[in-house]
Image (cartoon, helix red, strand yellow):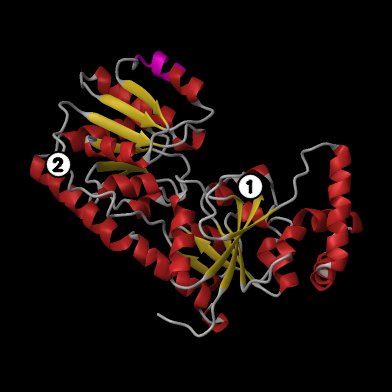
Amino acid sequence: MKRSKKIKIGLVLIAVPGYSETFFRNKIQGLQAQGVEVVLFVNHFKQGMDRLGCKVVCGPNFSKGAFKTVITSLWILLKALFVTPGKTFRYYQLEGKDGVSFKARIKHLIRHHFLLTESVDWLHFGFGMLAIDREHVAGAIGAKMAVSFRGADLYLSPLKHPGCYDRLFTKQVKYHVLSASMQETLAGYGISKEVVRVIPPAIDVTFFDNTHEEEALPGLHFLTVARLHWKKGLEYTLEALALIKDQGLDFHYHIIGEGDQYERLVFAVHQLGLQDCVSFTGKLSPKAVKAHLAQTTVYLQYSIQEGFCNAVLEAQAMGALCMVSDAEGLPENVMHGHTGWVVPKRQPHLLAQQLQKVLGLSDPEKTVIRNNAVSRVRSHFNIEDQEQAFFKFYNEAESDY
């Protein structure tokens, strides 16, 4: 697909995406491969970071003390008045029309002026919370505005910050979400489905494939790849495994990931008597994760909240039997009874029961599920399809949404 005019996308993130942040890296590289120019706007940038072939515009650093903050703020105001006067004035006016106070307008201008320094066709905020207090930047620079919601920013942020999206939801925005469930959630806020596009995550199916030839390890091996965070439901998973251990089942459960709930989870393992059955491996490379998946009997993702989850796609692509909760996008990730199993969240006894049923299936029955999962991931969640979906996202005529 070709176009006559080269599109320039401004992508707003917290930082330049690291090696493990495959969603953003794949998206950027895919757009570039189709001739789209990408500019990254980030809050933080460290020397030595991979720029992904993009221009990187970094926000101001206000963490160097009060005096330097004052000097930095004055310098930004001078640039706003003499380098970008037109965009600055439009931004100031648009904020005023929304009833933003003079003091807040000046503060927003100082903090967000770096976003006014480039001219782009689209200004796309990679997470919903990154658009807060920046709702008028796109209008000020003459760009269309897009916002992605990925899970926690749609389901948890409004609970921690009531009304945080009230202004955003009144603006002309095109939204990207990971699942139809998230599209329905936005509809509950009064957002028309016509301006919401569902583009699920994608994985490298040439890397995560089920053609491995490693000899399977003896015994039962369960696996979860996740941040050690409360929303991943790991305590409920451990409770379910304690139940099946009490029934005499021998297994080993590997948890790959790191996070601030490590001590809490280690204590839960001790209280549940699972010390000999559970291993915390910490964060591993994609190659090491793939090696674990190749030896996995059942992959478990019993999350409390989950936008979609790439790790589940990777597990399915590797032919692991997958069992997930019914949190948000997971029932769209795994088709119950066809590519895996979906269990109501927060009910470890149901997870234990379903796990026992799955382990009791015949080998031919398990093979059917594995093959269904591999085929669906390769057909519906590959990087090439995602690239085309985002290309269309930015190139649809306004009348199409």
Residue 244 is at least partly visible in this image: yes
Residue under the image location 54 percent in, 56 percent down: 149
Residue at 66 percent across and 63 percent down: it is 169
Residue 270 in the magenta stretch? The answer is yes
Q: Which amino acid is tagged 1?
A: Phe
Closer to the camera in the image, 210 or 49: 49
- Most foreground residue, 76 or 199: 76
Secondary structure category for the residue under label 2: loop
Q: Is residue 52 left or right of residue 365?
A: right
- Looking at the image, the residue that sits furthest to the front is 48
Residue 141 colored in magenta in the image? no
Q: Return the residue at label 2.
A: 213
The Cα–Cα distance between marks 2 and 1, rounded to whole angstroms, is 41 Å
Q: What amino acid type should be assigned to the residue bearing mark 2?
A: Glu
Question: Mark 1 = which residue?
Answer: 45
Which quadrant of the rendered structure holds the C terminus? bottom right
User: Nearer the N terminus, badge 2 or badge 1?
Assistant: 1
Residue 397 drawn at (x, y percent):
53, 82
**Left or right relative to 90: residue 154:** left
Q: Considering the whole magenta stretch, tell me its main secondary structure.
A: helix
Above or below 234: residue 393: below
Looking at the image, residue 38 lies above or below residue 295: below
Magenta segment boundaries in residue numbering: 267-273
